Amino acid sequence: MSSRETYTREPDDLLWEVPAAGAARFSWEYDEGRARLLALYQKGKDKQWDATTRIDWDQEVDPFDPLGTPDEVTALYGTAYWDRMSERERGSLRQHFASWQFSQFLHGEQGAMVCAARITESVPDLDAKFYSATQAMDEARHAEIYSRFLHEKVQLLYPVNDSLRALLDDTLRDARWDMPYLGMQVLIEGLALAAFGMLRDTTTKPLPHQILAYVMQDEARHVAFGRMALRDHYRQLSDAELREREEFVIEGCYLMRDRLRGLEVLENFGIPRAEALELTEQSEFLHLFRKLLFSRIVPCVKDIGLWGPRLQRAYADLGVLDLGDAQLDALMAQDEEIAEQLDARRFAAEEAARTAEVAATVAAGAADGEETGEETEGGAGRG
């Protein structure tokens, strides 16, 4: 099936071209590199996996309730619009919201794949090139997974959100080699990790939980990579250069906040844009959702050395300044642990099934042997 048939609204152009900027850099320095980055590169190699076999795609998903999250999370819940809806219409709304969320995940993962390739091309250090090459493979796998989930299970696709597209455009057009790191590894990946985590921890459906847990295991490495590389680089920059990057972060954070409304979904259900804006602003869940979504970005920005007065004022305006002291390493360790626990449970279940199958085969063989023995004894007696 072509994606054209799955989109709620077909994009103006299925191919989006962003003019390349900056230089491709080669390094002839083949020393051992930085131990931290090389250790992360080794981990990136060790942790590669196949989405076709690691994920159980046979699990059924109800397209009208793909995530099983409470209806209270939708901006329409408790409004007159919600009260007038039939159960079928509410199911359609759940499908559209899930599609919108996972469609933006899909588009963001393709953007991450392109940015990882751009980093491999433009970063000056060979150890960073090594790791970003493994990340490009990770992001390709994530785009594959979200595309399959949307096409096969949700059966609906939304175009890329304007704010996400604008941030991707700004990130890719900038000629400075560190900007794909900052735009993708810190802002887009940081926001995605928080969104993935909220859905992973609230969904009651096993397939999306499995998908999100495994993707987050990879993403934890990607954010760690961005932190390592940018922290080293930003120590060398002037105050003016740091302010330029802080301005980029401020603009990006406001763009990402505006991305989180899901206005496209509400408009598809006949709600005028101005009213949709008002409904989302009144949603208590959305306010909480927004704040939690910055839980991965703010401490990372502070950690890499971008924490000037203007940036702090912007975070205060967004209501997320206090997140600067969040324990990012603990969150990343938790992401790793959840995926490993999921694997352990799955392997234990598979081992139990194999053990039961062997036991049944042995029992069946023993029963056949007893029947054969009885027949032999009976035949001897008759003789």
Image: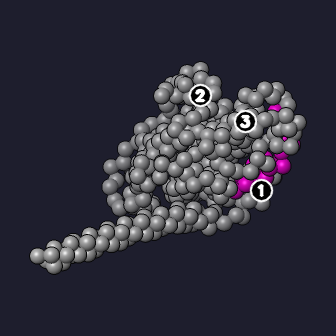
Gap between marks 1 and 3 measured at Cα: 41 Å
Q: Quadrant of residue 8?
A: top right
Residue with the mark numbered 1: 321
The amino acid type found where label 2 is placed reads Tyr
Q: Residue at x 57, y 55 (%)?
A: 206
Q: Is residue 130 visible?
A: yes
Which residue, given by chain and number where applicable, does mark 3 sit on?
A: 88
Which element is circle 1 on?
helix
Q: Quadrant of the C terminus?
A: bottom left
Q: Work out whether residue 132 or residue 7 is closer to the camera in this orientation and state it.
A: 7
Task: Report the residue that reaches farthest toward the right.
Answer: 80
Q: Position of residue 323 (x, y in %)?
A: 74, 59
Task: Please state if 101 lies on the left or on the right of 323 as rendered.
Answer: left
Amino acid type indicated by mark 1: Leu
Q: Which mark is residue 7?
A: 2
Q: Position of residue 221 (x, y in %)?
A: 51, 58
Which sits in the foreground, 236 or 45?
45
> As drawn, is 147 to the left or to the right of 350?
right
Disc 2 is placed on an element classified as loop
Q: At 58% across and 45% down in the image, what residue appears?
A: 61
Is 380 placed above or below 145 here? below
Residue at point 72% right, 33% down? Answer: 265
Badge 1, how many Cα within 10 Å: few under 14, some, many 20+? Answer: some
**Foreground disc of the pair 2, 3:** 3
Residue farthest to the left, as pictured: 383
The image position of residue 12, as x and y in percent, is 59, 20
On residue 168, the disc is: none
In this picture, residue 338 sits left or right of residue 203: left
Verify whether residue 286 appears in magenta. yes
